Amino acid sequence: MNQAFDFHKKAQASLWTAEEMDLTEDRLQWTNWLTPAERFILTQVLNLVQRFSAEVRIPEFRMFYNFQVMMENVHWEVYSLLITMLILDEDEQYHLFHAILSVPCVQAKVDWVLCWITSDASFASCVIAFATVEGIFFSGAFASIFWLKKKGMMPGLTFLNELISWDEGLHTDFACYMYSCLHHKLLDITLTNIMNTLVNGVLGLSVPSMVQYIKFVTDRLLVALNVSKIYNMDNPFEFVKMISLEGKMNFFECWVSDYAKYAKVFIMGEGP
């Protein structure tokens, strides 16, 4: 299982911590630059990812996943930090941290996840559900924040978004690798139905371009799992081409913060 160990080492090389995030400028821009509509969208994004970072756990991934759990805890910590730094109203903070109890769309997403990790579903189904969570659930949220990067706004948040999207891309790659190693795989129709129930029944998307983007991402994940596309959609968002969710990527060395933390960062496009 040398390839699995390589994934573990890649995860180690990407280690970063909440203390490395400088959100000073973001707090000023949140108050003075963002429109109410933009603040609302980001509030929903922060809420969604913070909740799932706390809820989703599948322990079977052993060495790689043990490291992944640690990184998901870092994600949870920094999203919590963002909420407390950007949302100054304590009642709104409480609402966001407890949205799983009060917001039906958040509860529906959590229920979808728990259905696959607490039921009698096969291990193959669990792996596919996990790949779907890592590869599709957050792609819309990442796209929303990359849109801010295109506008040159919220530098701390958008840098954090790059780090987390890299992490989730690696988690997706590992889930696809795990699935490729299984002897008892799902029928293609069963696999696509798992994703289709999420895209068309749970995510609750309404903006046409975002619907198209999520379907594009879903097709990309299906191809990574050696299954035919079901939507055949093009990417409507040119500004998110660098999101690290594809299966074959190259690495280059770069400095990821003023702490001189050395890490590996994905470049999209070419295979090894």
Image (cartoon, helix red, strand yellow):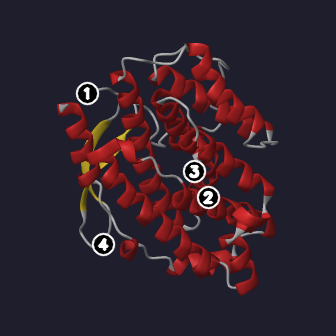
Provide the residue designation for mark 2: 148
Asked if one can make out residue 241 in the rendered structure from this viewpoint, the answer is: yes
Image coords of residue 191 (percent x, y):
57, 22
Image coords of residue 262 (percent x, y):
22, 60
The answer for how far apart the CA atoms under marks 4 and 1 are is 29 Å
Mark 1 falls on what kind of element? loop
Specify the amino acid type for callout 2.
Leu
The answer for how far apart the CA atoms under marks 2 and 3 are is 10 Å
The answer for how far apart the CA atoms under marks 2 and 1 are is 31 Å
Provide the residue designation for mark 1: 272
Circle 2 or circle 3, nearest the eye: 3
> Going from the N terminus, do you reach mark 3 or mark 4 first?
3
Mark 4 falls on what kind of element? loop
Q: Nearer the viewer, residue 82 or 74?
A: 74
Q: Residue at x 70, y 79 (%)?
A: 94
Circle 2 or circle 1, nearest the eye: 1
The answer for how far apart the CA atoms under marks 3 and 4 are is 23 Å
Provide the residue designation for mark 3: 142
Q: Nearer the viewer, residue 54 or 31?
A: 54
Provide the residue designation for mark 4: 258
Task: Check the image and report above or below for 161 versus 236.
Answer: below
